[in-house]
Amino acid sequence: MEDLRLRGFNTSSTTSTPPLHTLRHARRTTLNRVFMAVYTCAILAHLYHHAHKLIESTTLASFFITLSLFISDIILAIIWVMQQCFRVAIVYRSEFPENLEKVMKKSDFPALDVFICTADPYKEPPIRLVSTALSVMAYDYPTEKISVYVSDDGGSQLTLFACMEAAKFASHWLPFCRKTNIIDRSPEAYFASKHSWSSDAEKIKIMYERMKVRVENVLELGKVSEEYITDESERRALSKWTDEFTHQDHSTIIKVLLESSKNKDITDHLMPNLIYLSREKSKTSSHHFKAGALNVLLRVSAAMTNAPIILTMDCDTYSNDPQTPLRALCYLSNPQLQSKLGYVQFPQMFHGINKNDTYGSEYKRAFQTNPMGMDGLLGPNYMGTGCYFNRRVFFGGPSTFISPEITEISPYNIVANKPIQSQQILDLAHKVAGCSYENNTKWGFEMGFNYGSLVEDFYTGYRQKCDGWRSIFCNPKRPAFLGNAPISLIDGLNQCQRWVIGAMQVEFSKYSPITFGTRSMGLIMGLTYTYYILLPNWLIPYIIYAFLPQLALLNEVSIFPKLSEPWFFLYVFLFLGAYGSDLLEFIVEGGTVQRWWNDQRMWTIRVLSSYLFAFLEYFLKCLGISTYGFSLTNKVVDDEQSKRYDQGVFDFGVPSPMFVPITVAAIINLVSFFMGLMQVLKGSNSEELFLQMSMAGFVVVNCMPIYEAVVLRRDKGRMPVKITTISTCLVLTLYVLASQVLFI
Ligand SMILES: O=c1ccn([C@@H]2O[C@H](COP(=O)(O)OP(=O)(O)O[C@H]3O[C@H](CO)[C@@H](O)[C@H](O)[C@H]3O)[C@@H](O)[C@H]2O)c(=O)[nH]1
Ligand SMILES: [Mn+2]
C-alpha cells in the first residue's frame, strides 16, 4: 500500500536517477561460513565425547559432573549457533544525501516530528536536554518542517524552564549554525571541542554560558523563582506547578514554546516547532514507562503536526551530524523500499567513554556489528534512540492497516492548516495525552510502541518485524548520534539487569521469538531475536565453568581430558576458536585489543551479576514478591568517580549484592589456581589437572581489578569490606559443601 503521507516523492525509478544508497556484502562472509562448518564439526565431536563419558560414568558424582558440563556445553553450542545468524549476511551501506535534491525538490521533503524523552531533571541534566534539542532544531533540513516534542515524565518545571531557555537561545544558535556551517550542532559538544573562536562564536558562547548558569541555578534552587520569569506566558505555564502537583499525580501540561508559522529567528528565518509535553499522571493508572510516554507523543504530535517521519531520541543522545535526516530520507524516500520500510536505525554510540572502555559500555556487538548482520536479513532491532520511523509502522502491518479509535490521529490524516496553538488542536492534544485515554483501545498492544517489556525498544521493533515490516541500519563514518554511557560499574550493571529482565518479559510473552518470531520472520531472523531473549541462559554454563572445575581442582579431582589425549586439543580449539573469531571481528570493526579484552571481561561480570539478579527478580515478580521499575540510568557523576573512570580503575564503591557472586568467583579461582600450580610443581597429577588450572588461571587474569579492589586499594571505589567478608564466607561454605558432598 502506498503511503499517502509520503506522496510527493519521485516515484519513477528510471535508471538515470542518481543513486541514493548502495549496499555491499562483507568480504569475510565466505570465510565465516567455512569457519562455521569446521567449528560445528568440533562442537559435535565434543558433545559426542561428553555423551560417551556420561554413559561410562561409574559413580554418582562423576555422572553429575559430566552431566553439568554436558548441559553447559549444549547451551554454549546453541548460543554459538544463534550468534552465527548475525554473521551469515553482514552488509555495509552507503548513502548519498547530496543526490537527494536531484531526485526531489527540497520543498517536497516530508515533515519530521522529533520525540525527545526525559524523566528526571536530577538524573538527566536539563542542560544536556537543551543541547540535544538544539542539535536537531539546527538540522540541515527545511526548518519549518521540523517539530521537536520534549516529553517530560518527571513532570518538572525545571525541565520546562530549560526548554524555554532553549527556545530563546535557538533564535541565535540556528542562524549561527547556518552562517558558519559548523558540524557540531549541539552547543555543548561545539563549545567543548577546541575551536579557534571568531568574534561571533565568542558572543554566542557567552550567551550559551549564561543560559547554562540560569538552567543550573534553577536546578539547584529546585524551582523557577520570580527573577527567572520574563513574561506573562511563561508565568502562566509555570503556574501549573501548584502545591498539589507531584510528578506522579498531575494533569497534562502542553506548552508550545516555538511555533514555526509565527516565530522567527534573529535573521528573520522561520523556526521549528518546539513543544513541551508532560502527560497526565495518576497513581492509580499504569504509565508503561518510556513506551507510554512515546505513545502519548505519537498521539499529541498526530494532533498537531502529524509528520510522516518520526525521529525518537533519548535526552542524552544528541545528533552529531546535521545531515542525518537526509541520510534517513535516502532510504525512506525510496519507492522500492517505502511500502515495507518501518524504520532506519542509526547505531547507538557514546561520548565520554574512556580509552580502553573499562566497562565495555560501547556494546559494540549489540549496537554495531550485530545490526549489520541483521541488516542483511530483515533489518536491525530498534535501539530506542537515533531511529527514524515511518509513522505508518505504528498502525499495523504494511498491508493490514489498523485504524486508531479517532481519525484525527490517523497517520493518513492531513492536519488542517490551523495554528498548533488553536483551541481545537490543543483540546485534542490534551484529550489524547490523558491517563485514561488508552483504556479499551489497542494502544501498546497492536498500535504504537508495545507495552509489557522494560526493553520497549527491542520489543516494539521486534513486533513490527513480525507484522511484516523491515528496517535498515544506517552506519555512517561520522557517528550520527552520541549519548551518555554509564561510567560507574553499578550503574552499568543495573542498566544491564533492566535489559535482561526486559528480554525475559519478551521471552515469556505470547510473542516469544522462539515460537512466534521464527514463524513470522523466518528461522535465521527469528534466531537473531531469540539470541537476545535467551541471554539469561548464559548463566548456567558461566556458573558451572566459574565454579565446578575450580572446586574439583581444590579437591584434586580431574574432570577434563589429560594433556596427552586428543580431546584435550579439541577443548583448546573450541576455546581459542570462539575467543579468536570474536577478537578478529572486534578488530575488523575498528576495535582495539585492550577494548576487546575489557569487553569480554565485562561479559562474564555481567552474567554473574546483572543476569543472575535479573533472573532472580523476574521469578520473584512471578511469585508476586517484587515489582519492576524502570530505574533510570544516571547521567551525572561526581568528580572522584569520573577521575577513577578516566584512569580506568574499577569502581565498586557502593556495597551492592551484585558484587558478591563475582567476588566469590574471583576468590575461588585464585585459590584453586595456586593449589593447582602447587600440584603441577610437585609433579603429581599435572597432566590431568593442567586444563583446570589453565581455566582458573584465565579467570584469575580477568579478575585482577577485583583483587586490587579487595586487597590493595584504599580509595572510595574499593571493594566494600562487607562484600569481601560475605564473599569469603560463601567461598568457605561452597568449599565445604563441595568436598563433603561431591568430591568425597
Ligand atoms: O518512565 C520513563 C523511563 C525512562 N524514560 C526515558 O527513557 C530513556 C532511556 O532511559 P535510560 O535510563 O537512559 O536507559 P538506557 O538503558 O540508557 O536506555 C536504553 O535502553 C532503554 C530500554 O531499557 C531504551 O529505551 C533506550 O532508548 C536505550 O538507550 C531516557 O531518555 C528516559 O528519560 C522515560 O521517558 N520515561
Ligand atoms: Mn541512556
Image (cartoon, rainbow, N blue to C red):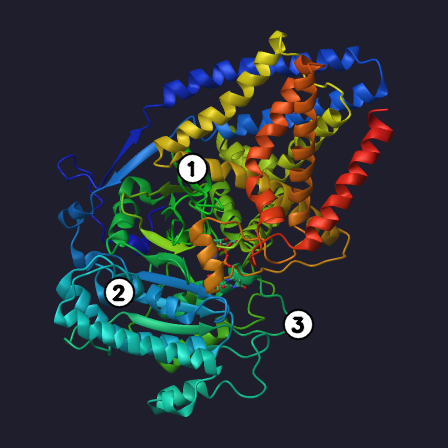
| Residue found 60% across the figure and 33% down from its top | 699
Q: Is mark 2 within 8 Å of ligand 2?
A: no
Residue on which disc 3 sits: 284
- Residue nearest the observer in this picture, 104 or 567: 567
**Residue 124 visible within the image:** yes
Q: Is mark 3 on a helix, strand or loop?
A: loop
Identify the image quadrant of residue 626.
Answer: bottom right
| Residue found 28% across the figure and 66% down from its top | 187
Identify the image quadrant of residue 695.
Answer: top right
Q: Do the residues labelled 1 and 2 touch (CB within 8 Å)?
A: no
Q: Which residue type does callout 2 highlight?
A: Phe
Residue on which disc 2 sits: 191
Instruction: Say which label, 1 or 3, has the lower sequence index.
Output: 3
Numbered mark located on residue 594 in the image: 1
Q: Mark 1 or 3, which is nearer the eye?
A: 1
| Residue found 36% across the figure and 42% down from its top | 473
Judged left or right of residue 189, residue 317 is right
Residue 186 on image: x %, y %: 29, 63
